[in-house]
Amino acid sequence: MSQRAPLLDAFLSALVALGLFAPMVGLQTTVGVHGIVLVPRPFAVAALVGAVFVLRLLVRLWQARRPPEHAGVGRIGRAFAGLGPYLVPALLAAALLMPWFANRATIDLGVLVLTYVMLGWGLNIVVGLAGLLDLGYVAFYAVGAYSYALIAENTGLGFWSCLPAAGALAALWGITLGFPVLRLRGDYLAIVTLAFGEIIRVVLLNWVSLTGGPNGISGIPRPTLFGLRFTMSDEPGTFAGFFHLAPSPMQRQIFLYYIILVLALLTNWVTLRLRRQPLGRVWEALREDEIACRSLGINITTTKLTAFAVGACFGGFAGAFFATRQGFISPESFTFMESATVLAIVVLGGMGSQLGVVLAALVMIGGPEMFRPLADYRMLIFGLALVVMMVLRPRGLVTERRPSVTLRRNAGAIPAAMIAEGRG
C-alpha cells in the first residue's frame, strides 16, 4: 500500500465530514429580535472535521500494520468464544434475579431490552438463518399487537387466550408476504419487504373503523396470573388480595418482566431446536447458495415461506406483549425505525448468533439509556460507538458459528475468516 493512501483516505473522509457537519453543526438557530437567526459555529465544525481526519488516519495505519491472519477472528472473537459457556448462564441468572434487586426504571428498561431481544431472535430466523433480508419486520409486530387488541376487545378473552391467535395471524401475514417475494433476493427483496411494512402502517392509519386510525386503541386488557388481576386494591380476585400482600405497582411490573422473559426464552429454545432439525439445515443451505439448494431438490418455496412464517409468528407474540404492556397502541409505534433497530441488532450481534443478538440489544437499547443524563450528546456517543464497532468488528460481536450438525461431539466452531461478511 502506498504511503500516501492513508493520508488521501483521511482527507476524503474529512471532506465528506465537512459536507455533513457544515449545515448540521455549523449553523445554529436562535430566536432573535426579528425572528429566527442563524448563528455560525465554524470552530465546532473545524474540531469535528479535524477529529474525523485524525481518527480515520489512525484507523488506516492500524489496518495496514495488523497481521492478515488476525483480520478474521481476532482477540475479541476468541474471548467471546472462550467466555460463551460461562457468559450464557451468567446472563440468564442475571435476567432471572434482576427484578428483585432493581428499581422500577431498571425493570422497565429490562422489559424493553427483552422485547427487542425477542424481536431480534425472531428476525434472526429470517435474516441470520435463511439469509432473507427483511426490512419490514415491524409489520408482523404491528399485526400481533392489533390482533391481540381487537380480539380481546371484541371477545372478552384474556391475554393467554389471545396470544396464540396473535402469533398465528402474524404467521399468516408472513406467508402472505412470502409468496410475492419468492423470486426476489438481495436489494429487491429488501425493497419489497420495506414497502410491505409501510403498507401495513398506512392501512392501520386509515382503516379508522377497525383500528381507530391515528387515535389507536386504548383500554387493552392486562395479563392475569391464573385469573388474578394486578390492581392497586386488595379485593378478592386480585394478586395482592389472594396472597395477602400490600398492593404495589411493582408487582405488575415484575410480572410483565417475567412474561417477556419466558416468551424470549421460548423463542430462543424453538430457534435452537429448529436449527438442529432438517428445516433449520435447509434454511442455512438456502442462505449459503440458493442455486445449490435447487440442484439438490430442496423446495425453495416451502423453505422461504416457513422462514417468514416462523419469524413473523414470534414478532406477533412480541407485538401482543407490547399491546398488553402499554394498554394503548397506535400506528406511530410501528414505524420503519423499529424495523431498522431490530435489523441493526441482528447485524451488529452477528447474523445467525443467538448470543450476539442479546449483546447487541444490551448495547443498542440499554446503551442510550445509560447516557440519558448527557441528553445532548448521547446519540453522538452512541453513533460513534457503532462506527468504531463496525470498523473493528465488521461481522458483528459474535463472528464464530457453531455447525448445526457435527460428526464429532466436541467439534470446533467455524471461524469468522471462513464466513462471508454480511452473509452470516
Image (tube, rainbow, N blue to C red):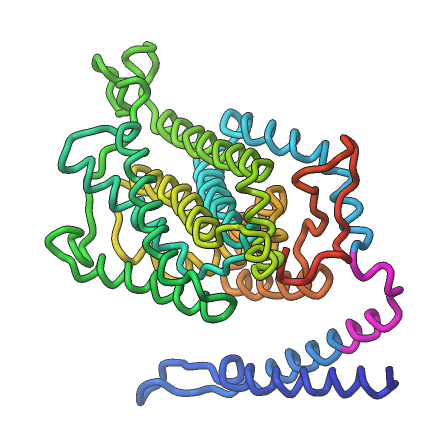
Does the stretch in magenta take in 59?
yes
Whether residue 28 is situated above or below residue 115 in the rendered picture: below
Measured as percent of width and height from the top left, residue 196 is found at: 34, 62
Q: In the drawing, does residue 338 fall left or right of residue 90?
A: left
User: Which of 1/25 is in front?
Assistant: 1
Task: Give the residue displayed 42% in from the left and 81% down from the top.
Answer: 29
Horizontal and vertical percent for residue 186? 52, 67
| Picture residue at 57% right of the left edge, 66% below the top | 380
Where is the N terminus found, in terms of image quarters? bottom right
Q: Quadrant of residue 34?
A: bottom left
Majority SS type along the magenta span: helix
As drawn, is 266 to the left or to the right of 53?
left
Question: Residue 73, relative to residue 37: is it above or below?
Answer: above
Name the residue rendered at 54%, 60% in the picture.
378
In the image, residue 325 lies at what x, y percent? 33, 38
Q: Quadrant of the C terminus?
A: bottom right
Q: Nearer the viewer, residue 84 or 419?
A: 419
In magenta stretch: residue 292: no
In this view, the residue in front, 157 or 307, is 307
User: What x and y, as percent, mark residue 355?
Assistant: 62, 42
Stretch of the chain drawn in magenta = 57-72
Q: Is residue 210 above or below residue 16?
A: above
Residue 197, quarter of the rendered image: bottom left
How many numbered callouts?
0
Q: Residue at x 69, y 42 (%)?
A: 403
